[in-house]
Every structure is written in structure tokens, then in C-alpha cells.
Image (cartoon, rainbow, N blue to C red):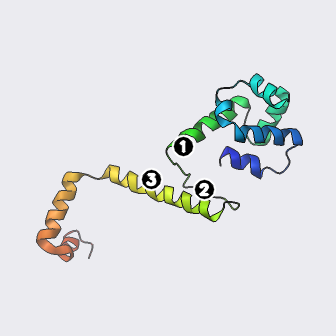
Amino acid sequence: MTLDKKITLYKNLTPVEVRIGNYIMNHKEVILNSTIQDLEKEVFVSKPAIHRFCKKIGLNGFNDLKVELAKEEKMEEKNWVDANVPFYEKDQSKEIANKLMDLYKSTIQGTYKCLDAKCMDEIAKFVNENGLYNAFKHLELI
């Protein structure tokens, strides 16, 4: 689950924690290069408040938060979608469609990387010479 989803779906955040979460969601690039002291000054909260926030959303602390942000940034670069949990109940239909498109695209790209051009040429030649029915029969698929 993305960090944005963890923050927005968590129901029992205090007003201070909501402020921390909103700042994080809107300043991800800044957070990646910040220290906890920087966040503390920017949002006007204490270090313990930041740590409590991190614990509430399932992280061990500020460093884990930065690691999660870095992972998500890397995944976004690749248009990566978690195939195990590709979308959530609150996702809009356009967001679901985009995630499905990204999943299909990554599946096709992964399959393409596994193809052997020489083998494909041999198969095409065999099918061309013998017909599709005989090719399937030869492979014992019929």
C-alpha cells in the first residue's frame, strides 16, 4: 500500500498528525532530502509527534518513512503497480483503469524480454511451411 493510501485511510490521526501527513504527501521530494529536524521546523511539531505519526501508519520511524518514499518514487518511475493489491476500494475508475493499463504494459514488457528471436523465427518458419493446425499437432496441443 502506498504511503498516501496509508495516510488517507488511517482514521484516528490527531490534528497534528493530519498536518504532518498532509505536509509529507505534498512535499515528498523535500522529505527525501530532509532530516527529522527539518520536518519538525517546517510543520511546527515535535520529534515524538513525528515518530507517533510514523508508528500509526505502520512504520518504525522517520527513516522508514524516507525509505518508503524512496521506494515509491522508484516505483513511479517504472509505472510499477503492485499486482497483489493493484487498487483499493476508494480508487476512482480512471485510477483503476490506469493501474490496469500499467499492469498489462509491464506484463507484456516482461514477456517480450523473455522472447528468443531465433526461436521465434524457427516457429514462424515451421508454421508457414506446415500450417497452424500441423504446428499445434506437432506440439501435441491438439
- Note whether residue 123 is visible: yes
Which kind of residue does numbered mark 2 sit on?
A: Val
Q: Residue lying furthest left in this view?
A: 129
Disc 3 residue type?
Ser
Inter-mark Cα distance, 3 to 1: 12 Å
* Front residue of 34 and 51: 34
- Distance between mark 2 and mark 3 Cα atoms: 15 Å
Say whether residue 55 is visible.
Answer: no
Indicate left or right for 92 with 61 as reference: left
Lower sequence index among marks 2 and 3: 2
On the image, the x and y values in percent for residue 45 come to 85, 30
Q: What element carries label 3?
A: helix
Amino acid type of the residue that numbered disc 1 sits on in the rendered structure: Met
When asked about the image quadrant of residue 26, the answer is top right
Q: In which quarter of the image is residue 42?
A: top right
Which residue in the structure is indicated by mark 2?
85
**Going from the N terminus, do you reach mark 3 or mark 1 first?**
1
Q: Name the residue under label 1.
A: 75
CB of mark 2 within 8 Å of CB of mark 3? no
Q: In the drawing, what numbered circle is on residue 106?
A: 3
Tell me where residue 85 sits by quadrant.
bottom right
Identify the secondary structure beneath mark 1.
helix
**Residue 66 image point, x, y percent:** 66, 32
- Tell me the mark number nearer the camera, choosing from 2 and 3: 3
Q: Which residue is drawn at 52% across and 48% down?
A: 80
Number of marks in the rendered image: 3
Residue 40 in picture, x, y percent from top left: 80, 27
Give the secondary structure at mark 2: loop
Task: Between residue 63 and residue 27, name the one nearer to us.
Answer: 27
Report the front residue among 87 and 101. Answer: 101
Q: Position of residue 133 (x, y in %)?
A: 20, 77
- In the image: residue 65, left or right of residue 133: right
